[in-house]
Image (cartoon, helix red, strand yellow):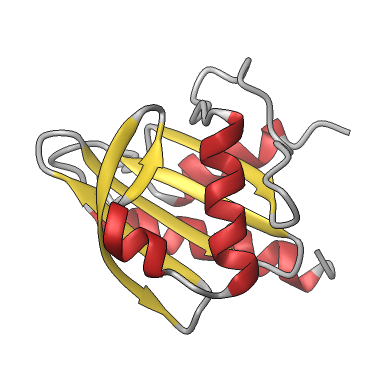
Amino acid sequence: MSWDSYLDNLIAQSKDSGGNAHVDKCAIIGIDGGAKWTTDGHANALKLTPDEAANIARAFKAKDFTTFMAGGVRAEGVKFQFLREEDKKCVYAKKKGDGALSIQSSKTALVLAHCPEGGQQGNTNKAVGVIAEYLESLGM
């Protein structure tokens, strides 16, 4: 089964009333070890290295974000500054000039999305939440 169609749905969920998407890249990875559920072949794939995915998954599995606080959140070789976490389920990070990351966990997966610089991160956060909550409703 391909999870890539979930990326299209996530991008659609990020659109504002004018039809502008506020997610340009996204991915879904497993919370156990960071295995990719979506492929890098998708046009809007957030292409995490195996180490980046594993580090993100490790922090969420442990519900310990001190590594993000100390060293930022790395995605596609970019270090995003940790902004905050909510309820041990969501992490938000930003890099000036490069945009922002929103990450939310379900029981077994992490939904990650990148908001381009100048985009509305609130729309990105909402879209990530919709997909993560849907996966949670499926027991994933």
Question: Where on the picture, by quarter, is residue 31?
Answer: bottom right
Q: Decide if residue 1 is on the left or right side of residue 52.
A: right
Q: Position of residue 62 (x, y in %)?
A: 61, 72
Q: Nearer the viewer, residue 122 or 45?
A: 45
Q: Is residue 88 above or below residue 114?
A: below
Q: Decide if residue 33 is on the left or right side of residue 74.
A: right
- Please tell me which residue is depicted at 58% across the width and 41% down the height of the picture: 53
Count all numbered tags in the image, as a single digit: 0
Q: Nearer the viewer, residue 129 or 38?
A: 38
Q: Is residue 32 above or below residue 23?
A: below
Q: Position of residue 43 (x, y in %)?
A: 52, 17
- Please tell me which residue is depicted at 30% across the width and 65% down the height of the picture: 69
Q: Position of residue 22 (x, y in %)?
A: 31, 43
- Please tell me which residue is depicted at 50% across the width and 73% down the height of the picture: 64
Q: Nearer the viewer, residue 19 or 56?
A: 56
Hey, which residue is sitting farthest right in the picture? Answer: 1
Q: Position of residue 117 (x, y in %)?
A: 16, 38
Q: Is residue 19 visible?
A: yes
Q: Is residue 38 above or below residue 29?
A: above
Q: Is residue 8 visible?
A: no
Hey, which residue is sitting farthest bottom in the picture? Answer: 87
- In the rendered image, the quadrant that contains the N terminus is top right
- In the rendered image, the quadrant that contains the C terminus is bottom right
Q: Decide if residue 121 is on the left or right side of residue 21.
A: left
Question: Where on the picture, by quarter, is residue 39?
Answer: top right
